Image: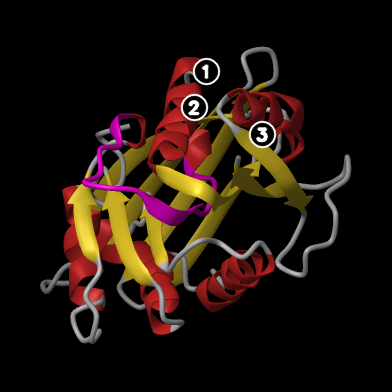
Amino acid sequence: MDEQYTMLARHYDTLTFDVDYAGYAAFADKLFQKHKIPGNLILEQACGTGSLTLELSQLGYEMIASDLSPDMLVAAQEKCAELEQQPVFICQDMCELDLYGTVDGCVCALDSLNYLTEQWQIKRAIKCVSMFLNKGGLFVFDVKTPKMFADLDGVSALWEEDGLFAAWQYGYDKKSMRAAHAVDLFERQDNGSYKRYGETHYQRAYTREKIEEILEQNGFRIAGVYKDYAMHKADDKTDRLYFAAVKK
């Protein structure tokens, strides 16, 4: 996991132009208000380049943002530089979360938990959130479902913009529930040639039942499992699950 999102950091926002961060922030804000979290301090884990951190800050939340990639954190700090109340940025593994105090809510977006490819890792990560979340606090996160990974198996995707060309290849093993997607990025240089970069990202699928079990084992009550920002209930055909879990 530590080798991922190094080359992609400076192009991440360009490649994820279609992600609705404002919608995700509004979704999380609605859940925080609905469940009356005890305060205003929110942790975003795996914050990437800080787009969601920025949106939540602009909604009035005091933010702590963590990520394992120093390159992503540099981009996040630059993006949030004009905020009146600056987020606190920390470089940490989700499995080794260590804060100075507790928080009132936690958000972990864009299937970041799927990057924890061993069961002990996702158990540890959720346990860490529980340790630093105040009673009545809310953990909001999403994961890709096994169905979505299976549907992506064997798929190739191409994307091009001026001076940048990207190619993805996806693979998934149903037995191990492990997935890999290779990313090749071609960046045009000043002399007209292209420089090639490559990364392979590894993920793992987890069933809804397994995640709910881990949450309950770590002092959470499942408040809702949704399939979209509109809070429609998830079903067997859902590609992405959005969880809301209250710390008991």
Q: CA distance from mark 1 to mark 2?
A: 5 Å
Residue at the (50%, 61%) spot, across then down:
38
Identify the amino acid type marked 3. Asp
Report whether 130 appears left or right of 97. right
Residue position marked by numbered label 3 in the rendering: 153
Image location of residue 181, percent across then percent down: 49, 37
Identify the amino acid type marked 1. Gln
Tell me, yes or no, whether the highlighted magenta stretch contains residue 221: no
Identify the amino acid type marked 2. Ile
Residue position marked by numbered label 1 in the rendering: 119
Split into 4 quadrants, where in the image is the C terminus? top right
Residue at the (50%, 23%) spot, across then down:
123
Image location of residue 53, percent across then percent down: 37, 68
Residue at the (77%, 36%) spot, across then down:
147
**Stretch in magenta:** 96-112
Q: Are marks 3 and 1 in contact (CB under 8 Å)?
A: no
Report whether 60 appears left or right of 87. right
